[in-house]
Amino acid sequence: MRFFGVSLAGVAFGSIFVGWFLARRALSGVDDVRQTAQSIAKGAFESRVPVKGTGDEVDQLAVAFNGMLGQIEAVLCSMREITDNIAHDLRSPITRMRGIAEVALATGGCVEEYETVVGRVVEECDRLLGMINTMLDISEAETGVAKLNLERFDIAKMVRDVYELFQPVAEEKAIDLRIDIPDSLFLVGDIRKLQRVVANLLDNALKYTKAHGTVCLSAAPNSTGVMLKVSDTGIGISEKDLPHVFDRFYRCDHSRSEQGSGLGLSLAKAFVGAHGGSISVISTTGAGTEFIVTLPDKFH
């Protein structure tokens, strides 16, 4: 009987020890999460929870937590980049508006002159607001927080509408604007965002193509969805500039004399990426440029 009691006590103590050990081991992962959260609260946004590779629930929690942290860090980096861009690229127009207003106050002109000044300031404000809204659209798309209004639509009709919109611009510049699309071509996507992509690429092509040149807009199905192309016989892009054309506010040397913010191609890349697609460019200085957009059909 005494032996039985000693054995029972030994088993009980052993069970308590094993239970304590297993509980401590299981909770160590939770403690890692707690320590990481405390580090992030102190500003160490690069901190991550160690993943032990056991595949248990705590390990899955660590993976999910790290994924969330990655998204948060991407949003913060994007916001920081926007702040830097605003500080750098909006300084000049704001200074210009201030100069216009100061000159108007100093000269003490008539009502008509004041009206002209106010009109110029309003134009500058509209341009700045457009630039800020575009930067926000790019950041939302790049960080995955942009809301896509997905629907199945005829992208051939959308491309045709953009073509007709820019046809008068091409005629005014004596540029041969061509289109090559099927009668219908359906795709799942956000029609307004993809419309802006095509419009930005076409506007760019017309802007940098000289009179009597050619710009071609095409769309065709491929193995995964749709391929869009915008090609021109314009001035082209140098090898030095080619890797940077999708960077925010980047403007090639030959484009600085043209109006623009340097955000059009960045926006196009962000919107295409938000659809799970890709955009690339091929260009030769003095011979022309071709932008290629591939968009997957989510119903395939």
Image (tube, grey):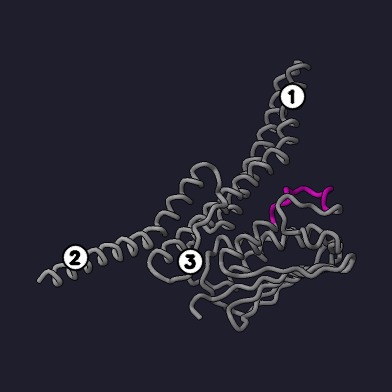
Residues rendered magenta in the picture? 255-264
Q: What amino acid type should be assigned to the residue bearing mark 2?
A: Ala
Location of residue 219 by image quarter: bottom right
User: Judging from the image, what secondary structure is the residue with disc 3 in?
Assistant: loop
Q: Residue at x 71, y 62 (%)?
A: 201
Per the rendering, the mark at residue 52 is: 3
Q: Give 14 or 26, whichever is nearer the viewer.
A: 14
Q: Residue at x 59, y 46 (%)?
A: 79
Q: Which residue is mark 2?
A: 9
Residue 104 % position (x, y) = 75, 21
Q: Give 179 or 190, whichever is nearer the viewer.
A: 190
Residue 86 % position (x, y) = 67, 40
Q: What amino acid type should be assigned to the residue bearing mark 3?
A: Lys
Q: Which residue is mark 1?
A: 113
Q: What amino acid type should be assigned to the residue bearing mark 1?
A: Glu
Q: Spatial distance from mark 3 to mark 1, Cα to Cα?
A: 72 Å
Q: Spatial distance from mark 2 to mark 1, Cα to Cα?
A: 100 Å
Q: Spatial distance from mark 3 to mark 2, Cα to Cα?
A: 35 Å
